[in-house]
Amino acid sequence: MSEKKQLTRIILTNTKRVGEDYLKSLEFRNNGNYDRKPNYVILKNGKVINTLKVGSSTNFFDEKKFNKNSIIICLENLGWVTKNTLSTTYSNWLGSKIEKVHERKWRDKFFWDVYTDEQMETLVNLCLEICEEHKIDKKFIGHNTLLPNIEKFSGIISRSNFSGQETDVSPSFNFAYLLENFDYE
């Protein structure tokens, strides 16, 4: 009988594309054998898509130590965007357009897609449910900057806590909302 692995953290990431396109890419990449799937995707409307059974192996991160004992939640978000000249729109690397952005210089980028209130509400509820079910510490890192030895942290973190190169979750992520609505023990 195989031993059930102990889950210790939730890692927040972005889709970096429109949610439906991201989900299709997971389904069809590598002829359906793509192994870099998150456990959950939260769309902008707050809908949760379970893409991988919790506890199943994933190679979401290149370094295995980041995948071990983690549940990955991917938020539909374009990430950093650029302003389209002669227009009021902004686009990501795939040309997906948005009009509302968060403006803040971070990691050499200036404009960021925003997370919706529906996503934030759903994220809090999903994190509370996962923490309760898997006995993950109900705490989180309240920022998106690199931290040494983050792989030892038990609780909720973002991909940008692992690397000074990653840009998710972005500066538009509302850490204050998480703090105000997360049920700390």
Image (cartoon, rainbow, N blue to C red):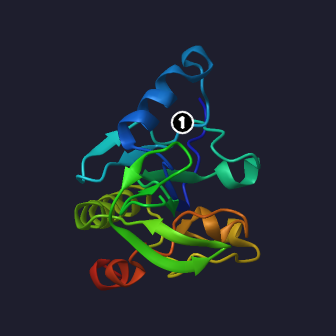
In which quadrant is the C terminus drawn?
bottom left
Asked whether residue 52 is in view, the answer is: no
Q: Position of residue 175 (x, y in %)?
A: 42, 79
Q: Position of residue 10 (x, y in %)?
A: 50, 60
Q: Position of residue 54 (x, y in %)?
A: 46, 42
- The local crowd at label 1, few if under 14, some if 14 to 19, many if 20 or more residues have their Cα within 10 Å, is few
The three-letter amino acid code for the residue at tag 1 is Ser
Outermost residue, front direction? 86
Q: Which residue is mark 1?
A: 56
The answer to whether residue 8 is above or below residue 97 is below
Report the residue at 66% width, 62% height from top: 166
Q: Nearer the viewer, residue 1 or 142?
A: 142
Q: Secondary structure at mark 1?
A: loop
Report the residue at 65% width, 49% height from top: 67
Q: Nearer the viewer, residue 147 or 97?
A: 97
- Place residue 100 in its image quadrant: bottom left
Outermost residue, top direction? 31
Asked whether residue 69 is in view, the answer is: yes
Q: Position of residue 48 (x, y in %)?
A: 29, 46
Residue 125 horizontal side relative to residue 15, left or right: left
Residue 170 horizontal side relative to residue 180, left or right: right
The answer to whether residue 183 is above or below residue 54 is below
- Place residue 149 in its image quadrant: bottom right
In which quadrant is the N terminus drawn?
top right
